[in-house]
Image (tube, rainbow, N blue to C red):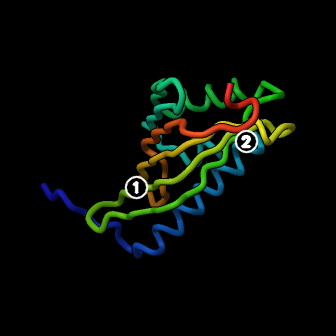
Amino acid sequence: MTLAQPAAAQSLAEAERAIRDQRAAFNRAIAAADLAQIAAVLADTVQMITGSDSVHVAGKQAHLDRWSDGFKDPNRLVYVRTTERVTVSPLLPIALETGHWRGAPKATPNDWIGGDYTAKWRRIDGVWRVEVETYVTMRCGGRGCR
């Protein structure tokens, strides 16, 4: 058994760019309430720990159900994740992304919550997909500070 298998045919810089592009697509999908595009970024076995209440969301369908429910709320928070750093493994087709997140209603962007996050990505069938995300709520503004 070989433990390390480099991400073939993609440089570390290309991998980082692809991950940043996937994060941007995910942000656009959240803003547009586009479940199909969200699904395209997630691994089937994706795991998430939410920022404020540490809810564990396991699997792609559970994620999509959670997003779908949230999209029904006209005052929903629109989340934006801002990548600060992507570190691509030279050994395996995996990477670690760190950054900041912020969620605010479209109508009142000064009422927000936010914090920091980490995301583990894996290249699956040539596409970088989110495998694990952990969010921590650290900051707020306006009515988001209640």
Residue 79 falls left or right of residue 7: right
**Marks 1 and 2, how far apart in space?**
25 Å
Which residue position holds label 2? 34
Report the number of discs: 2
Instruction: Look at discs 1 and 2 and give the one toward the viewer.
Output: 1
Q: What is the three-letter code of the residue carrying label 1? A: Leu
Q: Residue at x 61, y 50 (%)?
A: 81
Could you tell me which quadrant the C terminus lies in? top right
Which residue position holds label 1? 96
Number of the label disc, if any, that sits on residue 8: none
Provide residue 139's location: percent of width, then percent of height: 60, 40
Front residue of 43 and 106: 106
Residue 7 falls left or right of residue 35: left
- Is residue 73 positioned above or below 41 on the image? above
Which residue is at the far right? 107
Residue 122 falls left or right of residue 110: left
Q: Residues within 10 Å of mark 1 (few under 14, many from 20)?
A: some
Provide residue 109's location: percent of width, then percent of height: 80, 42
- Is residue 63 positioned above or below 11 on the image? above
- Is residue 124 positioned above or below 45 on the image? below
Q: What is the three-letter code of the residue carrying label 2? A: Asp
Q: Quadrant of residue 12?
A: bottom left
Q: For numbered disc 1, what is the local secondary structure?
A: strand
Could you tell me which quadrant the N terminus lies in? bottom left
Provide residue 51's location: percent of width, then percent of height: 52, 33
Query: Is there a contact, CB below 8 Å, between mark 1 and mark 2?
Result: no
Provide residue 120's location: percent of width, then percent of height: 41, 49
Q: For numbered disc 2, what is the local secondary structure?
A: loop
Q: Residue at x 67, y 50 (%)?
A: 27
Q: Residue at x 49, y 45 (%)?
A: 117
Q: Residue at x 45, y 55 (%)?
A: 97
